[in-house]
Image (cartoon, rainbow, N blue to C red):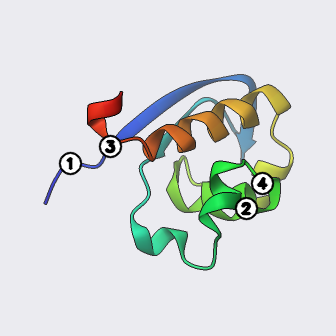
Amino acid sequence: MATPVTEQIDLESPITIGDKEHTTLTLRRPVAGELRGLSLSNVLNADVETLMVLVPRIAQPTLTRQHVAEMDLADLGTVAGTIAGFFQPASQK
């Protein structure tokens, strides 16, 4: 089994989970099953509702839909761009 592809994001605005403030977020390249129920075009078009479902499935620390809904807009844009980049073959990067 191959090592999962991950990207670390430095957050503009920390996310508080419990008593801990997180200044970074690690996203793991999703596998096909983690995209169940989602439209690929919505994922690639950074549809906010779709991101609120997908990001909790692939993020560390583990986020909830509400964490994503409250995310700073700049951070959400970075997350969306990172996810879109996961769909590029390595040969095109």
Question: Which residue reaches farthest left?
Answer: 1
Residue type of the residue flagged with mark 4: Asp
Residue type of the residue flagged with mark 1: Thr
Residue 66: x and y, percent?
82, 57
Residue beneath the point at 55% across and 42% down: 84
Q: Compared to 5, does 32 lie above or below?
A: below
Disc 4 versus disc 3: nearer the observer: 4
Residue type of the residue flagged with mark 3: Val
- Give the number of the disc on residue 50: 2
- Give the number of the disc on residue 5: 3
Mark nearer the N terminus (4 vs 3): 3
Using residue 90 as the reference point, say whether residue 73 is left or right of it: right
Q: Which residue is mark 4?
A: 47
Residue beneath the point at 55% across and 36% down: 82
Quadrant containing the C terminus is top left
Question: Which residue reaches farthest front?
Answer: 92
Q: CA distance from mark 4 to mark 1?
A: 28 Å
Q: CA distance from mark 2 to mark 4?
A: 5 Å
Q: Is residue 64 visible?
A: no
Using residue 25 as the reference point, say whether residue 76 is left or right of it: right
